[in-house]
Amino acid sequence: MSLFQAIALAVAAYLLLLARSAWRQGELPQFLWSLALVTALLGAVAAVVAAAIAIDRM
């Protein structure tokens, strides 16, 4: 197992524990919306970085 795989596994386990806690408190929909928002923001940042790299290589 590589370092990146270990980090990904740790992050996934942490998110599962957070989801379990949110479910027990009745806040799972809010947690999922927050997770979706963070995912979208990280995707937007990744797209901007990828575009900047692509433009720089031209």
Image (cartoon, rainbow, N blue to C red):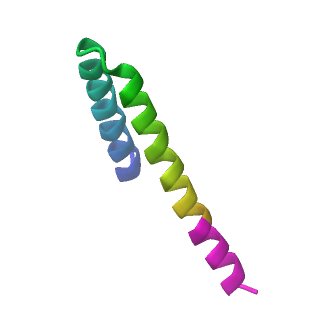
The spot of residue 1 in percent (x, y) is 38, 43
- The front one of 53 and 26 is 26
Main SS of the magenta part reads helix
Please provide percent x and percent y for residue 17: 26, 25
Q: Tell me the quarter of the image containing the C terminus.
A: bottom right
Q: Which residue is pictured at 42% across the width and 37% down the height?
A: 35
**Is residue 10 placed above or below 49 in the rendered structure?**
above
Q: Quadrant of residue 44?
A: bottom right
Q: Is residue 51 left or right of residue 22?
A: right
Residue 33 vs residue 43, the one in the foreground: 33
Residue 6 location in percent, x, y?
A: 34, 43
Nearer to me, 27 or 44:
27
In the picture shown, does residue 15 fall above or below 55? above
Position of 40 with respect to 6 (left or right) is right
User: Compared to 30, does 43 lie above or below?
Assistant: below
Q: From the top left corner, tell me how far across and down residue 23 is, in percent.
A: 31, 15
Residues drawn in magenta? 48-58
Residue sitting at x 33%, y 32%: 15
- Position of residue 30 relative to residue 20, above or below, is below
